[in-house]
Amino acid sequence: MLELSMFEALFGEETRIRNEIKDQGYSITEAPLWIFDKNALKIQPEPIFRLDLEGKRYYYKFLDRLKTEPIFYVSVGSSIASLDLLPTGKGILEYYAKHDRIEDVYRDIQRAADYGIFFHILAAQYCRDSYLILDSVPELASQFKARNQLDYDNRHWSNRAKRDLIALDTWLKEHEVKPIAVELMLACEEGFASAIDLVCEMTIGTSPNGKIYKKDIKNAECERVNAIVDFKTGKGFWENNYYQLEAGRRLIKYNFPTLRIDKLYNVSPKGMTDLRCEMEDQTGKALEKVVIGDFTTTLFDAYWGIYKTKFPDYNRPRYLTEITGMVNFDSIEYKLGGKDPRDIVVQKHRKDY
């Protein structure tokens, strides 16, 4: 059996997805199940798959055993948690104001996203295996740049990722984190789907964000809770973060109704000067009540309703444009066509399964 290199084992799927989108306009991934406590989840979730298009992500599963009737779900990141739907935060406006050109903003956002992908995969690997060799990080960063054809120097990622992993390790130990599931892809009847970074048992203190003080330990005031954790690598937390977490809570409730979720947290390494993580309690923030005319609902349901109204075809992936032939002064020798994503996924599963 061919032994995978460490890079292929960690980043092979991410590289494959990027290359396939570039070459054929789409990529299909079967969701792995990294479940550590089957007694906590009790129910095996239905198989779910991910369809990545240029700038858009969907999830899907089949309604029949023959895999001829796919049903699609829009990703939370592409829908309710998207920044074009939610109000623009003060921090984002201040960030834009620091740049003279919008191209510089897009460049920085893409670079931050690249590092976010890199660190998320390392963090998930550490949570799964309980160890990760820090000396391997520089080579992994170098290969990530080469395989993904990044057009900038990313060598500074090495020290940043090492420090961020140490911060994550400190946080995991301080809060006595016991993973239940990692990178869990789920869908629900409300029409959305997402990958949940971490479902876990953890210990929290009495501070508003769960930080454990010495007095909490001394007075035995710590509490053991079940939590959903979404890792971040940027500076600060934004409004869309707690919509993402609330979506995760609903996904867990739908797929694993016996698993109680007590808390929703964002966790982010503080940066180069502090080998610790910042933790933000987002529990209940997306459930704030809003009144629309005579109707009362939650912020989450209001925004999700707005999204579905604004994009009624939200769960129907767009056709992939296909152009063949040639341009010719004397005749029309090209064809404009399209591929239906429904047909693509059905054919894929007929071929592979």
Image: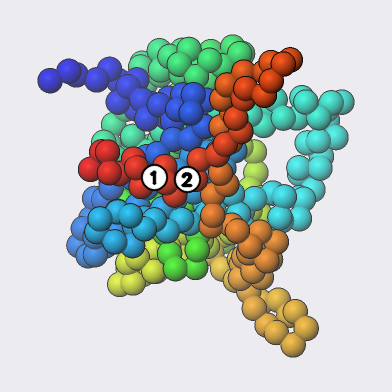
For mark 2, does the 10 Å Cα neighbourhood hold few (<14), some (14 to 19), or many (20 or more) residues?
some
Which quadrant is the C terminus positioned in?
A: top left
Q: Are marks 1 and 2 in contact (CB under 8 Å)?
A: yes
The three-letter amino acid code for the residue at tag 2 is Pro
* In the foreground, 284 or 246: 246
Residue at image coords 59%, 57%: 314
The circle on residue 341 is: 2
Q: Is residue 103 left or right of residue 211?
A: right
Which quadrant is the N terminus positioned in?
A: top left
Residue at image coords 57%, 47%: 318
The three-letter amino acid code for the residue at tag 1 is Val
Residue 190: give x, y in percent of width and height.
49, 68
Residue at image coords 33%, 55%: 68
Q: Secondary structure at mark 2?
A: helix
In space, the residues marked 1 and 2 are separated at their CA atoms by: 6 Å
Check disc 1 and report the residue beneath it: 345
